[in-house]
Image: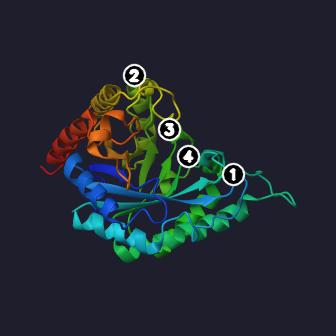
Amino acid sequence: MRINQEYFAGVTWGAMGRRGTWATSRADRSMELMASLTGATWTAIAFAAVQAKPQSTVIPFRDEPTITDDELKWAIAKARSLNLKVCLKPIVNCGDGTWRAHINFFDKDVPCEPKWSEWFSSYTAYILHYAAIAEETGCDMLCIGCETVQADRREKEWRALIAEVRKVYSGPITYNCDKYQEDNVTWWDAVDLIASSGYYPEHDWPEQLDRIEGVAKSFGKPFFFMEAGCPSRKGSAAIPNDWTLQGEPDELEQARYYRAMFAACETQPWVQGFMLWDWPANLYEQEEAGSNDDYCMYGKQSEGIVRDYYTSKVSQSSI
């Protein structure tokens, strides 16, 4: 894959899926609708393993609620049947509801306290398991982590993990840092693409893109947004990363946000695309779109905006 040239017209699929919700007729229909309605040529197939709390050092990825290997292989095969390229994206979450960015341990090992070395040992086993599946199934990209902000500073451990992944998986590797963290990661040279979560306020895109461009240029790596989007909820355009924000459903707000985001990125040719957040396996019915206030664009004005933009970008990149 020519990662330096390709445009990633992607949508994230299945991110909140739990065991038993994939490889169903409903999940089948969901992915078919995503492929046919959004103009996507890529999908990030995202799923999570759940550790008990931020200071837990065991990631029980073989247990519920994590999807089974058979469910995952079904999703990859389904995407391929729809002519979608696949980025496999294993995520770690906390069972107590704490955001993964707060997984953290002492910088120096202390007896009787949980340690980074213990967490990374478990995390490495987790990622290597899915790296092997990515290789077996021919996934086009592997994302080795998502928004683990406190762990970003552990450069030695990430470099060691990436070295182990490359023994198992032969395709391109990326890491999904969180918003505003692009210039805090010191080990971008170890991956093939730089990726981040682009949940920037509607009017802040130009300033943030100027900052991110410096990071991409300094490391000489392709850049894309592994996550980006906005809930269809009043007030969300100003704080699109807050999925708990209270507000009335408002698809016009979401549509306005997408127009602003795409317009800002259109002036920056070094931005090579998105894996927009998100499209669930258990998709709501189209007639429910007006009352749905989540990130999914199905049946909303933003669906057409995404489709038109992606169709245009893919056409341009193929010239």
Q: Can residue 263 be seen in this view?
A: yes
Q: Quadrant of residue 31?
A: bottom left
Disc 2/disc 4 C-alpha distance (Å):
25 Å
Disc 2/disc 3 C-alpha distance (Å):
15 Å
Locate residue 112 relative to residue 94 in the image: left or right. Answer: right
Label 2 or label 4, whichever lies nearer to me, is 2
Q: Which amino acid does label 2 sit on?
A: His
How many marks are shown on the rendered structure? Answer: 4
Which of the marked residues, 2 or 4, is nearer the chain's N terminus?
A: 4
Disc 3/disc 4 C-alpha distance (Å):
12 Å
Disc 3 is placed on an element classified as: loop
Residue where numbered disc 3 is placed: 179
Disc 4 is placed on an element classified as: loop
Disc 4/disc 1 C-alpha distance (Å):
20 Å
Locate residue 186 relative to residue 83 in the image: left or right. Answer: right
Which of the marked residues, 2 or 3, is nearer the chain's N terminus?
A: 3
Residue where numbered disc 2 is placed: 203
Report the disc number at residue 251. none
Task: Measuring from the top left, give residue 136's x and y in whole percent.
Answer: 39, 77
Disc 1/disc 3 C-alpha distance (Å):
20 Å
Residue where numbered disc 1 is placed: 54
In this view, 202 is above or below 155: above
Name which residue lies at 49% across and 75% down: 167
Q: Which amino acid does label 4 sit on?
A: Val
Which of the marked residues, 1 or 3, is nearer the chain's N terminus?
A: 1
Name which residue lies at 29% across and 62% down: 28
Which residue, as the protein is rendered here, is positioned at the far left?
Answer: 319
Task: Measuring from the top left, give residue 305's x and y in whole percent.
Answer: 23, 35
Q: What residue type is labelled 3?
A: Lys
State the residue in front, 4 or 124: 124
Disc 2 is placed on an element classified as: loop
